[in-house]
Amino acid sequence: MRVIGMMSGTSADGIDVVLARLSGAPPSISAKLEGHHHVPFPARLREAILRIANGAPTTTKEISSLNFVLGEEFVRAVLAACRQWRLPFTKIDLIGSHGQTIFHQGLASRDRGTRRVASTLQIGEPSIIAERTGVTTVADFRPADMAAGGQGAPLVPFVDYLLYRHAKRGRVALNIGGIANVTVIPAGARAQDVFAFDTGPGNMIVDALVESFTRGRQRYDRDARMALRGKTISALLQKMMREPYLRKAPAKTTGREQFGRGYAEEILAWGKRHRARPEDLVRTATLFTSLSIVDAFRGFILPRARVNEMIVAGGGARNPLMIAQLAAGLPGVEMIPADRFGVRAEAKEAFAFAVLAYEAFHGRTNNLPSATGARHAAVLGKLVNGRWQGKRRRGRR
């Protein structure tokens, strides 16, 4: 099958669209990346997403409207990608869309009543995607894992295991997106031997600081240019490294609710009180990401598994300061860009949701309970039939 995968991450900078050619079934699945395209969000739409995701007051009307607006935005991204690839919709068999997370709380907390509930919400209406493209669409992957007692994250480890397992080499797949997360695949691992968790912030805090200092002219610190001009603020870095989440044992997941706008505003306020330079704050936040990952390795990974290689993906893979600090903090672990395995770093998560959709379409379980904490394996994703699906099935016969 030719499957399109789409991902909009916690940074909400836009939509990554990939085209994957998939065949077979685990553990012998064949997965090849054929194309990748990125479509930025319009500034006002991104502002609306981040405002709601950061917990600003809103209304059910606004969330409902945004769900449909984002559905159209995902369609726009598919259209742009297919134009680039010169690929008509009729050549696409399936679409997998992660949607845009506006809330995620993997562990139960008390609501306004007496019940304790965990919940998640991804928007970007899949019915619009299926209607506009005519292609069957799978979306809303996380709730089924949470219904089975999991945290609904991380989901990419299922694909990491299929792509990266090795009989003799222990590997860790590290993704540095808005949040940083790891998948640990011991040498010769079975699915139940894999474990995964969010280490803490990835680019989220750095992006928020850069955007604030440049008044929105820059969304991220390209090539760590700002950070490399700064000096580390030791007192602030030590304060950040005392963050309780870093001490919490896996399985664990985090997001914008913990390391989003509110956290960045605390750093900005600290900097104002201590008259810190912008580039010093950005450098310190960049090192916080790297050191929190190193800390997770030392505390939770290396005691359980021998690691020979770390496969790095996500936007942070392009940040030379982050990568240099990781290499310095983890001697003996070879750093390998995800590109070497045939999937570009920035395409990795969208590619993963193409694979997850492919498995869901075939009715096969596509979570790793050892990663999410679910009681059992489950089929994740809700399927919306496209207008052309019946014709395709008859044609294949």
Image: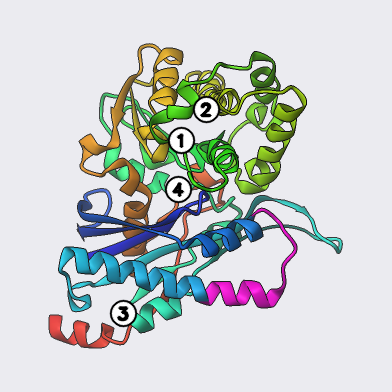
Of badges 4 and 2, nearer the viewer stands 2
Q: Count up the numbered dots.
A: 4
Q: Are marks 2 and 3 in contact (CB under 8 Å)?
A: no
Figure check: 368 above or below 170: below
How many C-alpha atoms fall within 10 Å of the one at disc 2: few (<14), some, or many (≥20)? many
The three-letter code of the residue at mark 4 reads Leu
Q: In terms of sequence position, does the residue under pointer 2 or pointer 1 come before the other?
A: 1
Which circle marks residue 133 in the picture?
Answer: 3
Image location of residue 295, percent across then percent down: 55, 21
Amino acid on which disc 2 is placed:
Thr
| Helix, strand or loop: magenta stretch | helix
Question: Mark 3 to mark 1: distance in Å?
Answer: 35 Å
The one of 264 and 90 positioned closer to us in this rendering? 264
Q: Which residue is mark 4?
A: 368
| Residue under numbered circle 1 | 221
**Nearer-N-terminus badge (3/1):** 3
Q: Which residue is mark 2?
A: 286
